[in-house]
Image: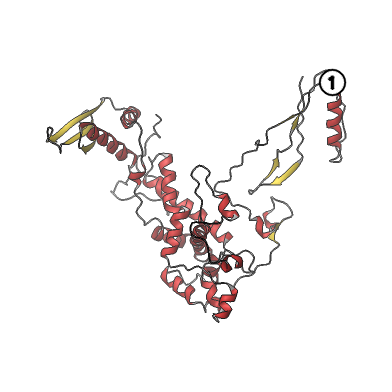
Amino acid sequence: MISYINYFVSYTNTPGSCRTPNLRKVFQIQTLQKLEIRSFPFTTPNIAPVMLRLLLRNSRLAPRRLPATTRITVASYNTAQLDTSLGPKYDSITDYGSYRNSVFTHRLPESTALQSPQLAALHSRLRLPQEYTFSTLSQALNMDKFGGLANNFGLSTLGKTFLSYYISEHLLLKYPRLPMPVHNAAVDAYMGVEVLAEIGRSWGIEVDRSSKLDKALAKEPEFLQYGRLRYLSERSKELKAEETGVHELSAEELQTMNNSTHQFVHRETEAFASSVRAIIGGIYTHCGEEATKTFIHSHILSRKVPLQEMFQFSRPTMELARVCEKLGLEDPLEIRLIAETGRLSSHAIFMAGAFVGKEKLGEGVGSSLGEAKTRAVVNALISYYMYSPISAEGTEIKLPSEEKYQFEGIVGTGDVAI
């Protein structure tokens, strides 16, 4: 008989909704059956080290320390992250009603926000509803956590949730056969950090770059800053002169660093993206879900994303053969030459097609016979994966978020594994 005793030394709060043990010091002790183990009263936390020493004294096996990389995996995607910089306090980590921030914050009065011409221009430019207050719009542009005003962390988290839902709903219903890598790339193309930052810049959002001293010397009214994107600290505003080609990474930028590509998300890019998500979250707060859906479809999903360019096939002919096998087509796959011209010239053109019996799945044109065959197979695969179902009346099918939704159309039997 072999028994195992795990001793967790410390606990750390992970940025999720659970308390996960920190396995930095986990000792595994194997005791033989002949070793007599007596019961120890675990009334205080100081008894556990004493028990370990007693077991080690009689055991012939030394303790084995697990590698430092051992961790309990936590699914942190699509979950709200706890903002530790605000000093949150709570009675219990699972009691969400007891959460409170130790840093004092208050909302900007509506009378002050109405005096900002930038907020009025942005509100009109985006055609926001009248229920959307200027103070909420100013909060959506505030990322300063220690300035005394409420920041956009909560609104940004809410807006990101609705973006993920409606974009995934749009892609899954309109293109149900998309492979998962292409689906993820399409989601990033709609709501990635760089994409949302470009959308925020196109909306005309300005950045507050002037320090308090510059504002005092210029006699700038205080309400002007509330209509600008505020994410820079006073020290960053004062250090305006930066050496060309040299950029000091902040703590937030270091967390986004990709060690393989040495790329990171610039703090200004993240600030613009956060403001766009927060504006969407503010629409749901004041106007409800239907207005939020309309805004996302008008400003985000209305953009044209070239999904065909996201496909990359390593062995397209084999994959098309697997697709035909999965669909249960009886006739074999054949690549036939349809037409050609100038075979012996320097500008030859070939047209090939992928056929299954008498049905043509796709065709392609190339300067060589091999290129034409490859293009024909790739076009056939793209036509299959880019399938979009329609209703019996020939119109687009309804989305699950719409009223009286009922699934229509034929999707398929799943992805193809090569």
Q: Residue at the bottom extreme?
A: 219
Secondary structure category for the residue under label 1: loop
Q: Quadrant of residue 44?
A: top right
Q: Position of residue 352 (x, y in %)?
A: 20, 34
Q: Mark 1 points at which residue?
A: 35
The kind of residue on which mark 1 rests is Leu
The quarter in which the N terminus is drawn is: top right
**Left or right relative to 99: residue 110:** left
Residue 345's place in the image compared with 208, above or below, is above
Q: In which quarter of the image is residue 124?
A: bottom left
Q: Where is residue 49 in the image (x, y as percent from the top left)?
A: 84, 35
Residue located 15% across and 37% down the image: 346
Res 404 visible: no
Q: Where is residue 134 in the image (x, y as percent from the top left)?
A: 52, 72
Residue located 40% across and 39% down the image: 179
Please tell me how crowded label 1 is: few (under 14), some (14-19), or many (20+) other residues with Cα within 10 Å: few
Residue 295's place in the image compared with 333, above or below, is below
**Left or right relative to 9: residue 82:** left
**Left or right relative to 17: residue 91:** right
Between 94 and 141, the residue placed more toward the observer is 141
Q: Position of residue 401 (x, y in %)?
A: 44, 53
The quarter in which the C terminus is drawn is: top left
Residue located 35% across and 46% down the image: 307
Q: In which quarter of the image is residue 54?
A: top right
Res 270 visible: yes
Between 177 and 400, the residue placed more toward the observer is 177
